[in-house]
Image: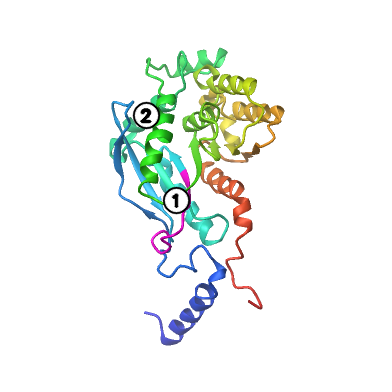
Amino acid sequence: MKQPGVRLLYAVLCAALWSGPASANPQLAAFPGARANMEITQPRMVRGTRFPYDHEITVALPASYHAAPDRKYPVLWVLDAPLMLRTVVGILDTLVIGNHAPEMIVVGVGSRSEDGLAGIGRRIIDFSPPGPDYYPPGDAGKAWSALAPLPEFPHRADDFLAYLVDELRPQLAATYRLSGEHALFGHSAGGMFAAYALFKRPGAFDKMIIGSPYLDGVRGAVFSAEADYSARNEDLPVALFLGAGEREIDEYFLAVSGIVSSMTRFSETLRLRRYPSLRLDTRIYAGEDHYTVVPRIVGEGIRQLWRDEAALLPSSWPVPGK
């Protein structure tokens, strides 16, 4: 139990740091009754009209959501929710409290956690663009199929994209206060899907964080979609953050998959197109592998994509003379 003097000092410090002017953190302190962190709501199952199975949808609401009933918020869509949602929400909580990112609604989409890895494995159906199989092209495809052969399965990326944009988005807009700005985060196979969506439904997402993407998958379907798009369009209005881990080059299966090389080639291709409205940042993180790189991609991706909004926020710390 704290001694009286210690309790008094603790109270004074808390008052100095957290009960100062509301402008110290206008996202939270200006709203009496705001939570300390985001509220992760109860997941619900939603079946799309084109699917024979359900997807679990989990919505995380900003800390100020209930305390600021007139505010609307941008939306960050997170693929592979059982694996990624809690990481994204935790990082965003910290960035928001430090005024490094605006508050936003996070929507996680994926299988039920209770379904285990079998449920997560279904993701390749959702994320695969149309094509002959799932392998990369050339010798890499032969090496993959020898190492990890896959049976034939439906490629439903177009259906999944329509599910996100045409079905789920209007449903959520009827329930939650969405600002109209939408961003998408996908990692690995989810990164392949996000990149494919960039060209199949341009404008559907204003921002994208694409981590360690399998861009050579389905015989390079993403590159085919980009080439087709560039032949018909002179601009690509999106803010895009690409990231991968240096150690992914050293892992045989990831090297066969072309994770780092395909992401680098993708970034270079977009640079060469000289799309005037494209905002592109690319990172390769030293010492990180396919899993350890996720927090770094999410953290820096959010900071980069919302850097203009964060620049309008003051310091989260007390300022002399204020």
Q: Earlier in the sequence, mark 1 or mark 2?
A: 1
**Residue 94 versus residue 174: which sits nearer the camera?**
174
Image quarter in which the C terminus is found? bottom right
In the rendering, at what x and y percent does residue 284 appear?
A: 63, 38
Residue at image x 51%, y 25%? 253
Quickly name the residue at label 1.
89
Occupied quadrant, residue 84: top left
Image quarter in which the N terminus is found? bottom left
| Vertical side of 264 occupied by 312: above or below | below
Which of the two marks, 1 or 2, is nearer to us in this view?
1
In this figure, what is the number of numbered marks? 2
**Residue 131 shown in magenta:** no
Q: Are marks 1 and 2 in contact (CB under 8 Å)?
A: no
**Residue 49 versus residue 195: which sits nearer the camera?**
49
Occupied quadrant, residue 247: top right
Main structural element of the magenta stretch: helix, strand or loop? Answer: loop
**Label 2 residue SS:** helix
**Residue 72 shown in magenta:** yes
Q: Which mark is residue 121?
A: 2
Residue projecting furthest to the bottom: 4
In the rendering, at what x and y percent does residue 68 appear?
A: 43, 62
In the rendering, at what x and y percent does residue 256 appear?
A: 54, 22
Residue at image x 39%, y 29%? 123
The kind of residue on which mark 1 rests is Val
**Residue 261 versus residue 44: which sits nearer the camera?**
44
**Label 1 residue SS:** helix
The kind of residue on which mark 2 rests is Gly
Q: Which residues are magenta?
A: 65-76
In the rendering, at what x and y percent does residue 95 appear?
A: 53, 56
